[in-house]
Image (cartoon, rainbow, N blue to C red):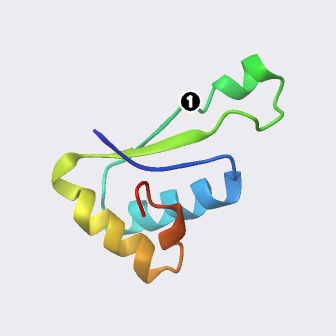
């Protein structure tokens, strides 16, 4: 899986997950449970990963939704 985005914002992660789920794109949120170790301060960013084959489609989905600035490398 390839990193699509990395953010500390739980709203962005939730929104991106909903977009991917509705589009039928498999995804995985990495580092989600790290908040327990850091005391739930939101200091450590979470990473949203998608399969390599779906990366371009997932990027376009986020661009169309208006959150292109969150895409890794954008």
Q: Nearer the viewer, residue 37 or 69?
A: 69
Q: Quadrant of residue 32?
A: top right
Taking the view exactly as shown, the residue that stands out farthest to the left is 53
Circle 1 packing at 10 Å, graded few (<14), some (14-19), many (20+), is few
Residue carrying label 1: 31
Q: Quadrant of the C terminus?
A: bottom left
Q: How many marks?
A: 1
Q: Quadrant of residue 41?
A: top right
Taking the view exactly as shown, the residue that stands out farthest to the top is 37
Q: Quadrant of the N terminus?
A: top left
Q: Is residue 60 above or below residue 41?
A: below
Q: Position of residue 65 (x, y in %)?
A: 49, 79
Q: Position of residue 18 (x, y in %)?
A: 51, 63
Taking the view exactly as shown, the residue that stands out farthest to the front is 73
Q: Quadrant of residue 58?
A: bottom left
Q: Nearer the viewer, residue 26 or 40?
A: 40
Question: Which residue is depicted at the point 77% across and 38% down?
Answer: 42
SS under mark 1? loop
Question: Which residue is depicted at the point 69% across and 53% down?
Answer: 9
Question: Which residue is depicted at the point 34% across and 66% down?
Answer: 59
Q: Position of residue 71 (x, y in %)?
A: 45, 60
Q: Is residue 25 above or below residue 69?
A: above
Q: Is residue 51 above or below residue 34?
A: below
- Answer left or right for 68 relative to 49: right
Q: Position of residue 60 (x, y in %)?
A: 33, 74
Q: Is residue 42 above or below residue 31?
A: below
- Answer left or right for 57 relative to 41: left
């Amino acid at each position: 899986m390839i990193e699509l985005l990395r953010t500390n914002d739980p709203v962005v992660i939730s929104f991106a997950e909903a977009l991917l789920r509705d589009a039928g794109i498999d995804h995985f949120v990495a580092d989600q449970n790290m908040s327990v170790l850091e005391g739930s301060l939101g200091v450590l960013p979470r990473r949203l990963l998608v399969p390599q084959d779906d990366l371009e489609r997932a990027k376009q989905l986020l661009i169309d939704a208006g959150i292109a600035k969150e895409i890794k490398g954008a």
